[in-house]
Amino acid sequence: MKTPHVLLLAAGMAGASGWVQAQTMDPLQVRSMAASCANCHGTHGIAEAGNESLAGVNRDELLKKMLDFKTGKKPATIMHQLSKGYSDEQLAALASYFSALKK
Amino acid sequence: MMQRRQFVQSVGAAGALGAMGLVTGCASTPGGSGPKVVVVGGGYGGATTAKYVRMWSDYGIDVTLVEPNSAFISCPISNLVLGGSKTMADITTPYDNLVKRHGVRWVQDMAVRIDPDKRVVVLAKGGELPYDRLILSPGVDFMWDTLPGMATAAAKDKVLHGWKAGAQTVALRQQLEAMPDGGVYAMAIPLAPYRCPPGPYERACQVASYFSKAKPKSKVLILDANDDVTSKGPLFKKAWKDRYDGIIEYRPKHKVVDVDAATNTLKFEFNDDLKAAVLNVIPDMRAGDIAVKTGLATANKRWCEVDFLTFESFAVKNIHVLGDSIQIAPAMPKSGHMANQHGKTCAAAVVALLTGKQPNAMPIYNNACYSFVSAEDVVHVSSVHRYDAEKKTMLPVAGAGGVSSAANELEGRYAMAWARNIWADTLA
């Protein structure tokens, strides 16, 4: 079950306000932030065998997953630690960025 | 000056057109009239920078990579070659894709001198490479003057460091294979900071893993100049006790001050001399020779201080230094993963600077470091680092990062996935 917190965010991101929020971040800054995920998830979000590709995935699902890692709702080996380093807005920008990449 | 400014402006316009896909331009041809970036060193830092400057300039900036080695050999995972579960081929990646896919011009040579006034790199085989922006990622070199007995080539051939993956990795594995059962392998660890903080402790596990199967009467003796294990301490100590009891012995506060290679003897600051069948001495390190020679090692004449927004040197304009050569920010490890992150941050900044834009004012990136405590089981340490505008450095984000709860096989698979992905991100 979703927590109210996640519900609120997921709803916000799906609506116009969420998009505005993500778009206020400098696109080049988001590109650099996303590139720092490439060490494990591949250049342009296309991963080598063994890790998940992020390119072209559903934006809301990816955001929910990262927020669930952050809150500890979804167990992980490392992502529960790394996701805590990013604000919810940054995670939303990352989800938007990766979802827009070609699979 | 006027000419230079006009030049940059025209490049900015070409870059913008290139971004819209309207221009393929002569700038993409090596030797063309576009801005020139030279990258010295094809490790995690340099190779990543070369690739990303090409990609993020829409292939408009000319990039030349100076790297003498014929292929990239990874330090991460190289301890598994010592342990016997991986081969040199497993940790080797060619430079072909940087050239073929990304149009990086690869010069297989050594940079011997830099002239910051003329803005040229002088090559060992002769010739000069002009640059608008120079990226130095030369890794570390060793402070041999702190170990007088290691001055000769014969001593260096016998007492190995194995801290630059390659010929030394192969030779050290051969020494371990040739050692009779019942022998002692003694590894000396320098005071931090050094390349790859958990690397020596992982190596101890790997050698012990090999001994436990092939020569169970043998011992691994860790002689650490530091007061305690410098990374993942409780996890390594647990692995040594649970898995390698009676094989691994850890002795902190053992600083090696000299080596007698002829008799395989270590001399310490405070402890008695120690002889072993195989010596593995990891010497003190500093920024790579070319960075030191160019006057960039401004921190204790050892490491290069840089602006963390651009990786531009504090000492010399238009030269960027990254990877293990830099004076690290607080809690930032000298790791391949981190060098790759430096490379992307630097690449974005260099593209911005060469096209008249502002570099990203708020870099944020992560570190993930996996250590194999056996052939299969792994422990990790992770962190997230964010630029602090007030302190003008990268700081770890409080509450983020951490270590594995225990060594496990799942993370062993993730560690290999990490390796495949970072090698591809750096080189393919």
Image (spheres, rainbow, N blue to C red):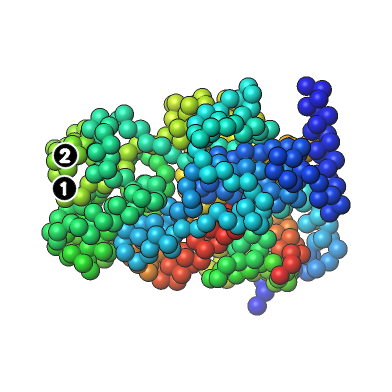
- Residue at left 59%, top 46%? B106
- Residue at left 33%, top 55%? B170
Q: Which residue is mark 1?
A: B276
The Cα–Cα distance between marks 2 and 1, rounded to whole angstroms, is 12 Å
Q: Nearer the viewer, mark 2 or mark 1?
A: 2
Q: Quick one: which residue is furthest to the front in this view?
A: B126
- Where is residue B293? Give x, y as percent: 48, 26
Q: Quick one: which residue is furthest to the bottom in this view?
A: A1
Q: Residues within 10 Å of mark 2 (few under 14, many from 20)?
A: few
Tag 2 subunit: B
- Please say whether residue A100 is visible from this viewpoint: yes
- Where is residue B108? Give x, y as percent: 53, 44
- Where is residue B134? Give x, y as percent: 62, 35
Q: Are marks 2 and 1 on the same chain?
A: yes
Quadrant of the image containing the C terminus of chain B: bottom right
Q: Nearer the viewer, residue B399 or A98?
A: A98
- Residue at left 28%, top 36%? B153
Q: Earlier in the sequence, mark 2 or mark 1?
A: 2
Is A12 placed left or right of B92 in the picture? right
Is B262 placed left or right of B294 in the picture? left
- Residue at left 60%, top 57%? B97
Task: Name the residue type under label 1.
Answer: Ala
- Where is residue B36? Give x, y as percent: 69, 37
Q: Residues within 10 Å of mark 1 (few under 14, many from 20)?
A: some
Tag 1 subunit: B
Q: Secondary structure at mark 2?
A: loop
Q: In this rendering, is residue B227 above or below A86?
A: above
- Please say whether residue B364 is visible from this viewpoint: no
Q: Which residue is mark 2?
A: B262
Quadrant of the image containing the N terminus of chain B: top right
Task: Name the residue type under label 2.
Answer: Ala
